[in-house]
Image: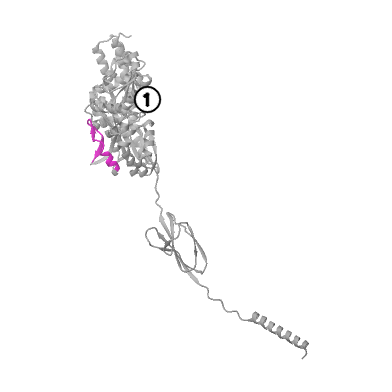
Amino acid sequence: MNKGISKILLIIIIVLIAVSIVAAILFWPTPPPPPTKKYVLSIAVSPEGTGNTNPESGAHVYEEGTKVSVSASPASGYTFVHWILDGKIAGNKTSIEVTMDKNHTLIAVFKKVTVVEEVVLRVITRHGYDILDVAKEKFLSSSIAKKYHIKDIKWLSVDPGQWVDIIKASATKPGQEIDVAWGGGPTLFDILIRYNLLSPFNLSEALEAANQIPDELSGAAMKRIRDGKIYWVAAAISSFGFTTNKDVLNKANLPRPTKWIDLANETYAATLPIPSVGVADPTKSTSNTRMYEIILQDYGWEKGWIIITLMGANAKIYDQSGLVRDAAIRGDVAVGITIDFYGYTAQLQNPELCEYIIPTDGSIVNGDPIALLSTSKHAKAAQAFIAWVISVEGQKIWLDKRVNRMPVNPGVFDTPEGKERTDLEAAYNRTLQALVINFSDDLALSYERAMQWFFYATITKAHTDLQSTWEMLAKARLQGKISQQDFNRLINELANPLLFNFTDPSTGKNTVFSQSYAQSINDKLFTDVNYRKQLVNIWQRAASARYKKVADELKALLGGS
């Protein structure tokens, strides 16, 4: 075989081998793939701290190597804490990614959200904003306010005659319920007890603070306790007397008053028709109400009303006791009847001009209360505020020179702030040592409403007729134109309540304004507005007629001049 043929055969053989190899590669059967691994991801939720799990999404099967993303979606009232992956904490972000390289157990841990209600207290009060602004600032920064989550206080400054109606009405307005009553005198708070508007203390902090307050001072109640339960406690103490303007007294040649009766004598009528005395209407002022009650119990019903009537005749009558104080400071009047802290503030601010005097014919130490209202929806927080007010810390508000009141908790004078107010501590001790009359809260309460409206009708409403008659009568005596005997007789006709005749609109009977009659109509004046309006009109007309009759008698004595 020649070489050419041999090469051709070799090439053919190589091609056949190559084709066989390619065919083998192209047509050789592919072996089956190995089986895919699958793993289980179990997802559960668990309340924090319990270890108990409840299926949320159950168990899910994923192929090996899969990356699974899971997000936590807490139910309402819950918050996410952390993940637990295969028994170990695996992060606290709300999403997690798990690589499926084996079976996994994933637990989402949640905890219940504790919703803390931030409390806004609503306080009905007779205090001025000089006190309230200081109290609010100090209390809201206190630890007890934070403990009971109190974020604000809303003050409701309301005339005392409207307290009962407004407190009752608040109970029918969700979110507007009133929590605390503060300031206004014990008789106002005893009225709230009568209407079942006070609740007894039961919070430990309030009871502990109340135990720091004496049950009474100088014979006056500092707490009202019924069946062993505390319904109100004094937050401050006070006395009642005069704030004088020395400059006006000197210029008018008027004597420095030392007794209640001094303000009812003819000497203080010498400046009329410009009044030298300032008083407030008792239907608008609880402190002046208390002063008139002091006079009635000090001098008796008959003589007490004569003094009150002539004091009113000598006076300009204001709507608020604070206006009386301001009038004395400005010099509009020579003397105003005021609660002590008004007088001490005037004296502190104007030491050369003003003086506060406790009457030597008697005053009382009064506890000015604070109480929990039955309408409160935040009873614990409300009592926390009460506890702070009567604690040593809260009593520091009275030491502020813008406030200037006497604390009920004497422990405050042992604090650094208290040691700086030696003047107030001296006033405190002087008040406790003053002549204190035998005063009955129960007696005052038994005729209080009748006393207030009788004053309003016969002195405030009929003031022009009263003052003009008294001016003529007093000046006739000062000028020696009538005898002391005639003067006393005409005063009796002018001001004695037992000579005041009128017809009761309910019974139709003719009567006089005796203490027993006042007590008999006292409750009716609370409950029957129409009766009260009728009676006030009858009293006003009868009073004006009475004053004009005395004026006519005086003119006759003076020979018609």
Q: Is residue 12 above or below residue 375?
A: below
| Quadrant for the C terminus in the image | top left
Q: How many marks overall?
A: 1
Q: Quadrant of residue 15?
A: bottom right
Residues shaded magenta: 205-226
| Quadrant for the N terminus in the image | bottom right
Residue 27 placement (x, y as % from top left): 64, 81
Q: Quadrant of residue 323?
A: top left
Left or right, 40 with respect to 471, comes to right
* Pick the front one: 97 or 336: 97
Q: Residues within 10 Å of mark 1 (few under 14, many from 20)?
A: some
* Pick the front one: 329 or 531: 329
Q: Would residue 300 be visible to someone looking at this image? A: no
Residue 312 placement (x, y as % from top left): 32, 21
Residue 239 placement (x, y as % from top left): 28, 27
Q: Is residue 229 above or below residue 352?
A: below
Left or right, 36 with respect to 292, comes to right
* Pick the front one: 55 or 540: 55
Specify the amino acid type for callout 1.
Leu
Residue 297 placement (x, y as % from top left): 23, 26
Q: Which residue is mark 1?
A: 323
Q: Is residue 7 above or below residue 275?
A: below
Q: Please check the rendered image and state whether residue 66 is part of the magenta-colored stretch, yes or no.
A: no
Mark 1 element type? helix
* Pick the front one: 367 or 498: 367
Q: Residue furthest bottom?
A: 1
Its colouring scheme is: one colour
Q: Would residue 50 be visible to someone looking at this image? A: yes
Q: Residue furthest front?
A: 3
